[in-house]
Structure formats: C-alpha cells, structure tokens
Image (cartoon, coloured by chain):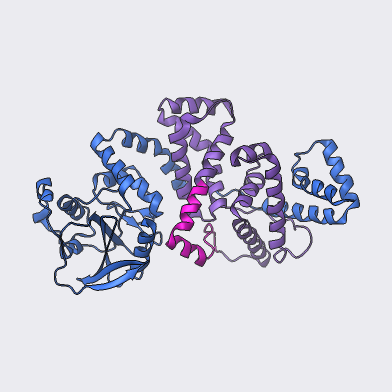
C-alpha cells in the first residue's frame, strides 16, 4: 500500500459513504480498506462524524416568522412607491450615516407642547440643541419629531441601520423591543425622523441622535466629564437622572441619552463608535 | 423544481405578492433551519431568514430558469448568512455575547425527564454545539449535505467550489465532529439516538 494510493482513497471516503461514487470506484475503495488499517480507521471516523451530524433534525420555525415573511413584498412596494424626496433622504442616509438610535423604558410625560409647531424655517435658523430638552423629549415619538424638525437630525434608513448595527428596531408602537416588526411599525418608523433601536439584550433603552457637528449645543450648566470610549474622546454629563454621552466624528455629532443607572450605556457607545470607525 | 413553484416565480416577477407567499411556503422551513445551523442561535436565525427572503425578493429577476431554483435559493441564502455572520462577529456587543454565550437553543419543555432522556438530550446538544463550532466552510458543507441532503453537485454550485473540494471539506468536517464528540460518545459507533425534536 503506498501513500499516493492512501491519499487517493481518503479523498473518496465521504463520496463513498454518500453514494456519490460509481460502483467501480466504490469497489476500488472497499478493496483498499480491506488491506489498509490506517484508511479503515479514517473511514470509521468519517462515518461516525456523518452519523453524528445526521442526529440533528429540522427545527420548526417560529410561527411569527411566516407572518413577517409574507409582508416582505409589501415592504418593498412601500419603499418603491415612497416620494422621491424620501427615497433621496433614504439614499443619503444609507451613504452618509453611521447612525442611530434608541431604546428606552422611560415613560416621559412632559413633552413640550409649545415646540410642536416647529417649522423648517426654525430649523434653518440653527436652533441650539438643549441637552435638558433632549432628555425630556426622549422616549416619545412626538418629542422626536419636534427635535428632528428643529435640529435637522438625519433620517435613518431602517433597513440599513438594522444591517449595520445588528440592533433590533423598536418603534413607539412596540411594547416589547424583542417583538418583530410588521408593516405598521415600519410605516411609523419611516414617518418618524428618528429611529428607535434596541440593544439585542433588550432590557435597557438608549437613545442616540445625530446632527452636524457644528450645530450649536447648550449643556444647561451640568458638569461635563471628559472620557474616552473605544479610543474616541467623549463628553459625559448627567441631567435629571439621565446620562448623556456626546462624541463627534467625521462632521457628525452623536448624542446618546440613557438612564443614569443603565449598565449598558458605555458598552453600546463603544459598539456604535467602533461600528462607525 | 415543482411546476407550480416555477409558475409562482414567474408570477412573483410580475409583482404578484401572493406568489411570493408560495415561495415562502416552500422554503421557509429549509431557510430557517439553514440559518439556525449556520448561526447557532434561533433569534439570529429568525432575523437572518428575513434577510434571506428580502434578498430573494429583490434579486429574483437574476434567476435563470435553466438551473434548479433550490440551488439558486441556497446560494443566495448562504451568501447572506456568511455576510450576516461576518457582520455579527465584527459587532463588539455581539462578539461579547458570543463569547459569553450559554445555550440559547430553542426553548423546550422543562417537565421532569427520565435519566435516559436527559442523557440523550445532552448528547444531541453536544452534537449541536460541535457542529456550531466547526469552521464556517466545513460547517456549510456538513449542514448542506447531512442536514439538507443536497447532492455534491448542488453543494458545489451553492458554495462555488469544485465537487472535490466539497468532498474534502466533508471528510474534514466529519473527522472533526467525531474527534470532538469522542468524550460525549465514548463507545465506538454512534448509539441509536432519536433525532433532535423541536
């Protein structure tokens, strides 16, 4: 028995087990195995590995999956039929965004109603972003809309955000961040200038807003701490029981708001900064 | 490919939303299982399956009716899953979770079980973990062949490699499985265990 023979036969062991060889080739393998204990051992291992692998049976998909899949064509239609301006915004968001985003268990009640009528003319005047107001507005769709209108916050392409961040989307209609998205969620998300995303762990909600780095920003007198996260200089401050983290990169300012006792805050910031670098 | 599915593909290309439902019916289970075995996590598999079908829907017009639709479908799925896993591993939080991962397999009934059943479940779990720990190229080969029962020619088309490469990857994957599971299955030969159930 020479080595070349053994090499040739060993390359045929799996095909032999899987019925992929001709009868003649099979006989050739069998004849070799009858006289070569080393190859017979290799054959036994491969046969055993094959038997083990086939122990794993098919799993039933979750029932909600089909519901989500059957709605995919409608999602595509909704994107195709969206106004050109929105499609352009989505495209810009796709190209230029690092992103993101949210989640929050907070129930904020005092959204400033007097901001509700903000217009694009206001936005053009570069209204300073007050971090105090931001922490108030976090957590409600209306609050986000007002902020976005005032501060020209960039719209996030939901599908792209999902792909890039591997986060799951939460929108104001969703009670549970682990609940899957359906069309009504996506419709609302597309209409909302900011997107709510949740960490996969889903327990702690965090909001991240983005705007041009040069936009005026008001800290409201809270002491600012300088920290470094994932090699990126950040500013950290606490307002009304919430932790605010701010960093700037590539002309974009990201501001993240979370509950002050949220142990995930720094981890998520690190993830976002790393994902954008 | 069944004739009715060929018809469904044609109608889907003509923007018939119901026709897409027929493709979903035919492949949902296979694609979910492929995603589950490749990613090793039921929640990720669920999301990845949606990504697969989104891609199928968006690229269906590239399917040429000369080849088998199932091979095309598996190829789209495998490319999606490989990208998905790459992104997944790049994500710091995910990587952390991956490292800390406990068994996040499908929830099962927790009613008291006889010792023998517990042992069987442990062994099935050991196989599942061993498959999940195979290098991605080897895992793809073994999942497509031993769990999805694709032929070497189909696997070769799905993975874009020669049939000889498929054979050598299967040899190596099976050898690694046998080696890794020697402790869980100390006796030579695999005892007749029931297949994993959902």
Q: Main secondary structure of the magenta part?
A: helix
In the image, A253: left or right of B11? left
Q: Is residue B106 a member of the stretch shown in magenta?
A: yes
- What x and y, as percent, mark residue A243? 26, 69
Q: Quadrant of the N terminus of chain B?
A: top right
Please tell me whether residue A130 is drawn above or below residue A72 in the rendered image.
below
Along the line of sight, which residue is nearer the eye, A160 or B181? A160
- What x and y, as percent, mark residue B136? 59, 52
Q: Is residue A241 visible?
A: no
Tally the marks: 0
Which region of the structure is painted magenta?
Answer: B81-110
Residue B111, quarter of picture: bottom right
Along the line of sight, which residue is nearer the eye, B121 or A4? A4
Query: Which residue occupies 59% across, 31% down?
Result: B68
- What x and y, as percent, mark residue A210? 25, 55
In the image, B176: left or right of A1? left
Query: Which residue occupies 61% across, 50% down?
Result: B137
Chain B rendered in what hue?
Answer: purple
Chain A rendered in what hue?
Answer: blue
Residue B71, quarter of picture: top right
Along the line of sight, which residue is nearer the eye, B108 or A165? A165
Q: Is residue B94 a member of the stretch shown in magenta?
A: yes
Please tell me whether residue A131 is drawn above or below residue A53 in the rendered image.
below
In the image, B68: left or right of B51? right
Please tell me whether residue A206 is drawn above or below residue B72 in the rendered image.
below
Q: Residue furthest front?
A: A250
- What x and y, as percent, mark residue A15? 75, 43
Q: Is residue B72 visible?
A: yes
């Amino acid at each position: 028995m020479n080595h070349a023979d053994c090499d040739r036969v060993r390359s045929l062991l799996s095909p032999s087990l899987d019925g992929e060889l001709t009868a003649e080739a099979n006989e050739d393998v069998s004849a070799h195995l009858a006289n070569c204990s080393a190859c017979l051992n290799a054959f036994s291992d491969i046969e055993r590995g094959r038997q083990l692998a086939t122990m794993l049976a098919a799993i039933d998909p979750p029932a909600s999956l089909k519901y989500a899949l059957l709605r995919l064509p409608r999602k595509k239609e909704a994107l195709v039929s969206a106004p050109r301006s929105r499609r352009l915004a989505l495209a810009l968001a796709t190209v230029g965004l690092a992103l993101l985003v949210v989640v929050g268990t907070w129930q904020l009640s005092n959204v400033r109603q007097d901001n509700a009528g903000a217009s694009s003319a206001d936005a053009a005047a570069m209204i300073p972003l007050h971090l105090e107001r931001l922490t108030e507005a976090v957590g409600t769709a209306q609050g986000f809309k007002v902020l976005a209108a005032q501060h020209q916050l960039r719209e996030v392409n939901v599908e792209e955000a999902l792909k890039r961040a591997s986060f799951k989307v939460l929108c104001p209609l969703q009670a549970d961040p682990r609940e899957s998205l359906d069309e009504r969620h996506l419709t609302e998300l597309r209409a909302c200038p900011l997107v709510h995303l949740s960490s996969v762990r889903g327990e702690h909600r965090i909001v991240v807003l983005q705007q041009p780095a040069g936009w005026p920003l008001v800290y409201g007198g809270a002491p600012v701490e300088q920290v470094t996260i994932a090699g990126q200089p950040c500013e950290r401050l606490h307002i009304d029981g919430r932790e605010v983290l701010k960093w700037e990169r590539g002309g974009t300012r990201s501001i993240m708001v979370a509950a002050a006792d949220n142990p995930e805050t720094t981890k998520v910031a690190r993830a976002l900064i790393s994902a954008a670098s | 490919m069944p004739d009715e599915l060929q018809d469904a593909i044609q109608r889907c290309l003509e923007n018939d939303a119901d026709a897409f439902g027929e493709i979903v019916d035919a492949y949902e289970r296979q694609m979910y299982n492929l995603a589950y075995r490749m990613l090793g996590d039921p929640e990720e598999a669920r999301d990845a399956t949606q990504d697969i079908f989104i891609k199928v829907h968006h690229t269906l017009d590239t399917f040429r009716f000369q080849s088998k639709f199932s091979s095309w479908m598996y190829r789209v799925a495998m490319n999606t899953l490989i990208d998905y896993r790459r992104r997944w591993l790049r994500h710091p939080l995910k990587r952390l979770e991956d490292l800390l991962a406990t068994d996040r397999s499908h929830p099962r009934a927790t009613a008291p079980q006889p010792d023998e059943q517990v042992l069987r479940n442990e062994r099935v779990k050991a196989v599942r973990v061993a498959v999940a720990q195979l290098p991605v190229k080897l895992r793809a080969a073994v999942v497509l062949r031993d769990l999805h029962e694709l032929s070497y020619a189909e696997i070769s088309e799905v993975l874009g490699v020669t049939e000889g490469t498929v054979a050598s990857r299967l040899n190596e994957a099976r050898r690694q499985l046998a080696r890794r599971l020697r402790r869980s299955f100390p006796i030579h030969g695999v005892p007749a265990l029931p297949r994993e159930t959902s």
